[in-house]
Each structure stands twice: as C-alpha cells, then as structure tokens.
Image (cartoon, rainbow, N blue to C red):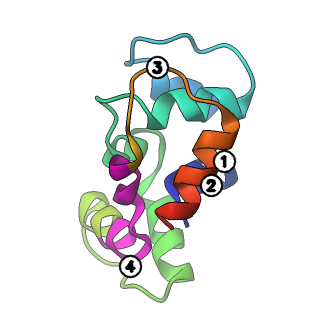
Amino acid sequence: MDLQKFIDNYLNKEDIKELTSEFDFKQTGSKKEIIERLIFDPDFEPEDITTVLYKEDVQDFCEDLDLGVSGTKGDLWDNFVDKLELDKKKAARVSKKPVSAKVVKVLTQLYK
C-alpha cells in the first residue's frame, strides 16, 4: 500500500489537518489535495503520522498484518512501515511544486 492510500484510508480529514499543522502549506481543500501536499513536502516523514495516532491504533494496524503487537508505539510503527514499505514515497519526490493527480497516480503505481 502506498503512503497516500494509507493516509486516505486510515486518517480522517481532521487528523490530517492536525498532522499538517506543523508544515508550511495551506490546509484547505479536499482531503486528497491536503494529502498530496503532505506527502510531497520535503520535511514530511512517515513517522510523523504517529503524532495523530494512539499506540492502540498502531497495534491494530500491526495485528491486521500478523505482526507483533508488543513494544513501544515507535517500534510498532517501524515494523508496520517496513512491512508495507510506506517510506518508498520518498523516491517519488521530484519537486516541491504541486503536481497533478495524474502524475501522483503514476508515481504511486511505480513505487507500490
């Protein structure tokens, strides 16, 4: 699963706005637009998502993938990210400029 799809499926718009509050871009627009701005921000890292999740949320994600559910929230998140390879979105970063949905779709397909 790519990072964009994960955020869209598991976080609501308010969680995403809370997550993006530390980044320097506008937080208005559709959920999809905000997610695109977030994942293409050079300062964003997948572990930033844990700021809007409880440990129990991460345990649920891990349990769904038959991963261990004990350890710190950070350790669980690392296992989850490794399993889904969520950090591969880094390779898709080509510019800080907004990109079209078509370009994002092509890039996320390449890095699945």
Q: Secondary structure at mark 1?
A: helix
Residue in view at x 55 percent, y 10 percent: 26
Disc 4 residue crowd, few under 14, some 14–19, many 20+, Cα 10 Å: some
Q: Main secondary structure of the magenta part?
A: helix
Confirm whether the magenta stretch covers residue 18.
no
Residue position for label 3: 97
Q: Earlier in the sequence, mark 3 or mark 2?
A: 2
Residue at image coords 51%, 83%: 65
Determine the secondary structure under disc 2. Answer: helix
Q: Amino acid at mark 4?
A: Val
List x then y, in percent, for residue 22: 37, 18
**Label 1, label 4: how many angstroms apart (C-alpha)?**
23 Å
Residue wearing tag 2: 5
Circle 3 packing at 10 Å, graded few (<14), some (14-19), many (20+), is few
| Amino acid, disc 1 | Asp
Q: Residue 39 location in percent, x, y? A: 46, 38
Name the foreground residue: 96 vs 35.
96
Q: Amino acid at mark 2?
A: Lys
Q: CA distance from mark 3 to mark 2?
A: 20 Å
Task: Tell me where the magenta segment starts and ends, as one range.
Answer: 79-91
- Please give the residue where the numbered disc 4 appears in the rendered image: 69
Mark 1, residue position = 8
Marked residue nearer the N-terminal end (4 or 2):
2
Q: Marks 3 and 1: which is nearer the front?
A: 3
Q: In the displayed structure, would residue 36 be above or below residue 84? A: above
**Vertical comparison of 50 with 63: above or below:** above
Residue 76 in the image: x percent, y percent? 32, 68
Q: Name the secondary structure under disc 3.
A: loop
Left or right: residue 46 versus residue 64 is left
